[in-house]
Image (tube, rainbow, N blue to C red):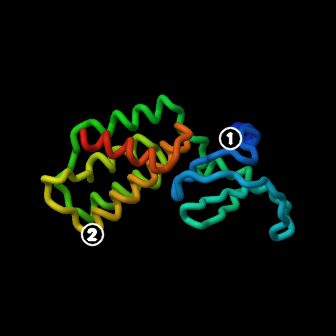
Amino acid sequence: MTEKKATPVSRKKKAKLEYSKGDHVVYPSHGVGQITSIEEQEISGYKLKLFVIDFPHEKMTLRVPTTKAEATGMRPLASTKVMKQALETLKGRARVKRTMWSRRAQEYEAKINSGDPVSIAEVVRDLHRNEDQPDQSYSERQIYEAAKERLTRELAAVEKIEHDDAQVKLNKLLAA
């Protein structure tokens, strides 16, 4: 049983070395942030090494123990290949299930909080409305905007472009 535990710990140690100050990372429930420092704090008598991650769009700073970064789902930015796949997803046909809105809303929220750009793109694609389509409900609009914003921020960080340029790029893909 101790051997099984040794493997994930060694992976976590590797992940700890992958991030450094200034790196952009994705924290599933908050989106793209930047590591502003790696600090050591004493909490309940234990010394912990923490990633300090700034999320300027949420006006929030998060401290994640370096040993728990992988377990929390924190990951590096998506590769250009994954982002390209997410953008291709936007071009597909919307797949709206005929289930209750509350159930679909939960599924959409789960996809957004997974932090996976392709899943987030599916939410944007499924909830997008063109000019000639009926309006969305308030909760539908909120989920759509949250997903689109999350995807826009990661696209901007991956392609090293301004947020507004990433927004324009997504809008063009959705309009096509």
Residue shown at 46%/36% (left/top)?
83
Q: Element at badge 1?
A: helix
**Residue 1 seen in this snapshot:** no
- Callout 1 amino acid: Pro
As displayed, is residue 45 above or below residue 151?
below
Residue 140 on image: x %, y %: 28, 62
Up/down of 176 relative to 108, above or below: above
Q: Provide the residue designation for mark 2.
A: 138
What residue appears at the point 44 percent right and 43 percent down from the top-left corner? 117
Q: Position of residue 93 (x, y in %)?
A: 22, 39
Residue shown at the point (51%, 31%) measured from the top left: 80
Q: Give x and y (percent) for residue 60.
A: 61, 66
Side of 161 where 129 appears, left or right = left
Q: CA distance from mark 1 to mark 2?
A: 42 Å
Question: How many labels sit on residues?
Answer: 2
Side (left or right) of 11 relative to 159: right
